[in-house]
Image (tube, helix red, strand yellow):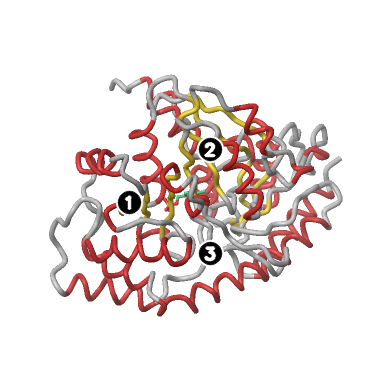
Amino acid sequence: MKVSSRVHRMKESSTLAVAARAAALKKEGADIVAFGTGEPDFDTPSNIKDAAIEGLRAGLTKYVATPGTLDARTAVAGKLRDENGIPCKAEHISITAGAKHALYLVLQTLIDPGDEVILPTPAWVSYRPLIELAGGRCVEVAGSMERGFKVLPEELAAAMTPRTAAVILNSPSNPCGITYTPDEIRALCEVIARHPSAVLVSDEIYEKLVYPEIQPGLQHFSPGSLPAMAERTITLNGMSKAFAMTGWRIGYVCAPGSSGFIQELIKLQGQMTNNIPAFFMPAIVEALSPRSASQVEAMRVAFARRAGVVDELVRAVPRFRSVRSTGAFYSFPSIAACKGLTSAGGRAITDAQSFAEALLLEAHVALVPGGDFGECAADHIRITFAAEEALLRKGMARIAEFTGALR
Ligand SMILES: Cc1ncc(COP(=O)(O)O)c(C=O)c1O
């Protein structure tokens, strides 16, 4: 059957591919330690589940407004105003089928063929394919590991042109596990502010997972709170990571101001998916209420502890080089020193892809090779530490043994 060239050209999500491969080996009986998928190992807090069940029982089973009910949009806008300092109202919000869907809608609404989108890399695997699907040109700006994977204002300035339609910023970052400080974000925004036609797309899906335990004083900062950026920042977020709700598929987009952008986006959403399930709406209100805060914080504290454990274990692998994880749940070490070596099972290690494949087959640890996170990331591997400490130690011991046995 015919397949469109634009979809045929698109790469499969490598993170989902790794998960499928690990699941297949598991099914065959292998004892796989899975560090691949980027989702919390915790369950959704029960008050949030109850709110959805009550919504279902109360008959929230019909279509509602495409961007969500007024209650849910009001709750999202209230959260963004109170917690993030973003001047917005319910009418600036649309609730989507995950932040990934929100990103798709934003890029389709924003990009014309040939427009450039600046992507600081290493970056999440879906940005480039979705930019290109929208007809945009992805301009990677590599953040070097020596500078903690962070892009400097002068590097961003050098990449911006009159064709720059958007800059994507993702802090805390998948896959780097790093968090920009408020001052670093302000400095990047000063560069963007000099280009009036460029928009900042701020993906804040990991905002609740920031670790001052590791970098004292560190906190999340929303660029949409800066007066100069308020009407030029599109903020993406969702329930997946902070509330352990990946399977629910709830995200949201906020585009304040009078540009009419959000209405155009909702028009597209209305032709695609309409609203997300109506009985999720009370669950969103519940998740964003103070009743869920202590559970979110308990998960954050657990992730902070695991970040410390994994950092220590990664640093103890002589052939790895890494940056400390200060946010999200990822460690992103370089395996460059392993290249040119051969595994105990006789497999040649030429890059992170071959490293990850050999590791999965010989040591039964699943993780994601860096290539799809950006051209600069081909020698990195992503270790997700969304697992209990005992499992983290078990998997890291296997990685250390596998790496130590390379010759
Ligand atoms: C940086 C980033 N943004 C967005 C998403 C999408 O999250 P969801 O679609 O589950 O809301 C992910 C998921 O891995 C992510 O890592």
Does ligand 1 reach within 8 Å of label 1's beta carbon? yes
Residue at label 1?
97
* Real-space CA distance between mark 3 and mark 2, rounded to the nearest whole angstrom: 26 Å
Q: Residue at x 72, y 34 (%)?
A: 351
Check disc 2 and report its element: helix, strand or loop.
Answer: helix
Kindly state the secondary structure of the residue where label 1 is placed.
loop
Disc 3 residue lies near ligand 1 with CB under 8 A: no
Which comes before the other along the chain, label 3 or label 2?
2
The amino acid type of the residue labelled 1 equals: Ala
Q: Residue at x 65, y 68 (%)?
A: 304
**Which circle's residue, 1 or 3, is located before the other in the chain?**
1
Residue 208's tag is 3
Left/right placement of residue 89 relative to residue 240 reads: left
Give the residue pinned by disc 2: 193
Q: Does residue 23 show up?
A: no
2 or 1: tag closer to the N-terminus: 1
- Which element type, helix, strand or loop, lies under badge 3? loop
Left or right position of 157 against 406: left
Residue depth check, mark 1 versus mark 3: number of the one nearer the observer: 3
Q: Residues within 10 Å of mark 2 (few under 14, many from 20)?
A: some
Residue 47 quadrant: bottom left
Q: How far apart are labels 1 and 3 at the CA level?
A: 20 Å
Q: Are marks 3 and 2 in contact (CB under 8 Å)?
A: no
In the image shown, does 215 or 391 lie closer to the viewer?
A: 215
Q: Amino acid at mark 3?
A: Lys
Residue lying at 32% horizontally and 66% vertically, measured from the top left: 75
x, y (%) of residue 83?
Answer: 47, 66
Front position among marks 3 and 2 = 2
Looking at this view, is 98 or 193 the one in front? Answer: 193
Query: Where residue 88 appears, x then y in whole percent?
Result: 36, 56
Is residue 228 something one can see in this rendering? yes
Expressed as whole percent of the image width and height from the top left, the position of residue 270 reads 20, 43
